[in-house]
Amino acid sequence: MRILFLGAPGSGKGTQCKKLADKTGLVHLSSGDMLREATAKGTEAGQLAKGFMDKGQLVPDEVLIKMFEEKLSSPECSKGFILDGFPRNIAQARSLDALLEKLRAQLNVVINLQIDDHLLTERIVGRRVCSNKSCNSVYHVTFSPPKQEGRCDLCGSDLYQRSDDKEELVKERLHTYHNLTEPLIDFYDAKLLLRTINAQGQAETIFADILKTLEEKKSPTSK
Ligand code: AMP
């Protein structure tokens, strides 16, 4: 399947996509992770991206489109993928359409994780991420703390707070989301691909809802 996730920063997209990738074996393509990796490696794209990410703004479309063109054309994506964080505006969504057409592929479903704004800041500011790039597990200081403070339960590496998860940047990121990314909800609804899921409960409940939605999508006649 080719699945796209939409949702504000802090809606739990990354966590849910990771769980889904583990369960289905589909490739998880997180634009934020890809950009952070490029930044850490100091590639040309990474250096350009850093300035925008540090301000909570979108990185120029060309950078993302090139990155996803390469990824989606690669053999690892031929059986399907989970898109997380791309597209982030209408221009990117149109480029994705064109790219998929070139690959003779189509999205099967767009899952929109719906959550009230007032919950997002607390979720984002309390988020801690594993520093081991091949683990990348996500915790929350209050809602899902690690067993030992500052250490990943799975691999024992240090946890850190993303620089753009600091409170002063969250407002800007939410503003960017509402202005530029939220219009994608209508864009994909018009294509009859959109399924909205309440993302305010427990991660396990939300994941069960996602699996149910995907099952219904696979066999649309079953109730
Ligand atoms: P995320 O990890 O998805 O919250 O993304 C972190 C940051 O990476 C965002 O605040 C943007 O600066 C940048 N970014 C991620 N995905 C995109 C995208 N599709 N287009 C432009 N910028 C992006």
Image (cartoon, helix red, strand yellow):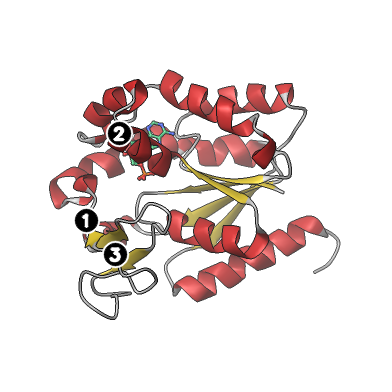
- Name which residue type carries label 2: Thr
C-alpha span from label 2 to label 1: 16 Å
Is 113 on the left-hand or right-hand side of 187? left
Q: Residue furthest left?
A: 168
Q: Rate crowding at label 3 as few (under 14), some (14 to 19) or many (20 or more) other CA atoms within 10 Å.
A: some
Front one among 197 and 13 = 13
- Does residue 48 appear in the picture of this structure? yes
First in sequence, mark 2 or 3: give its number.
2
Three-letter residue code for mark 3: Ser
Q: Which residue is mark 2?
A: 39
Instruction: Name the image quarter holding residue 159.
Output: bottom left
Q: Position of residue 61 (x, y in %)?
A: 43, 22
Describe the element under mark 3 as helix, strand or loop.
loop
Mark 1, Cα crowd under 10 Å, few <14 / some 14-19 / many 20+, is: some
Can you name the residue that lies furthest to the bottom here?
147
Q: Earlier in the sequence, mark 2 or mark 1?
A: 2
Relative to residue 52, is residue 20 depicted above or below? below
Determine whether the residue tagged by mark 1 lies in a helix, strand or loop: loop
Which amino acid, by three-letter code, is at mark 1?
Gln
Looking at the rendered structure, which numbered label has been put on residue 151? Answer: none
Identify residue for label 1: 161
Q: Position of residue 58 (x, y in %)?
A: 33, 30
